[in-house]
Amino acid sequence: MGRNSIIQFYTTEENEQRLQEQADAANKSLSEYCHQVVDEHISEKQHEQQKRRYSVEQQVELKLDEIRSETSTLLSTFQSERARLEHMQRLRTIYVMALWRLLRNDYSQSKQEEALNWSVNHVGQEPIDDPELRPLLTSTQESSSNLEPEKSDTLSANTSGGDSQ
């Protein structure tokens, strides 16, 4: 590729003198030396841009690796928790089945069906939301609060917002 384009610029006499000295030291004409300086400058800038681009890509890759690692850790934790919950669910099912087996002979077929139907209809509800269980729960709460009046007095005193001393 030949050099056939002209770029002309103005500078101070001091800069021209320094450029000429540098050109003489490199054993080049002023034009050749300026061309070399501009060419090196352009190459350096392109290299810096590529380096920045690579640096950003590298940072993105590092962040993705970090996210993958965190996700893997969270997934492992979730799987171990899930296994623990499945184990607890299995134990609960075994206990319920054992209780049913023990109690089923004490009740008639119609009472067993009634209990099963009631259970199916109430699965997923909070016990306090059930009209049949609410009185049992509130009476249990009332009896426990009647047994320990000092604790409820202390609790109300501590939650009133004032100093407890």
Image (cartoon, rainbow, N blue to C red):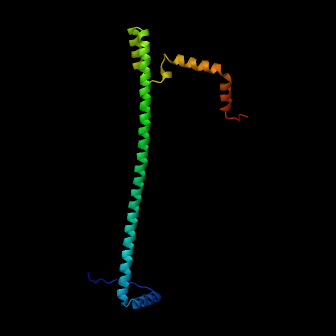
- Residue 84 sits in which quadrant? top left
Image spot of residue 46 (x, y percent): 36, 72
Residues 51 and 14: in front is 51
Residue found 43% across the figure and 90% down from its top? 21
Image spot of residue 85 (x, y percent): 44, 32
Image spot of residue 155 (x, y percent): 65, 29
Q: Is residue 106 visible?
A: yes
Residue found 43% across the figure and 19% down from its top? 98
Location of the C terminus (image quadrant): top right
Residues 44 and 106: in front is 106
- Give left or right: position of 101 versus 161: left
- Residue 78 sits in which quadrant? top left
Placement of 60 over or under 114, stated as above or below: below
- Residue 86 sits in which quadrant? top left
Residue found 42% across the figure and 24% down from its top? 93
How many marks the image carries: the answer is 0
Location of the N terminus (image quadrant): bottom left
Image spot of residue 58 (x, y percent): 39, 60
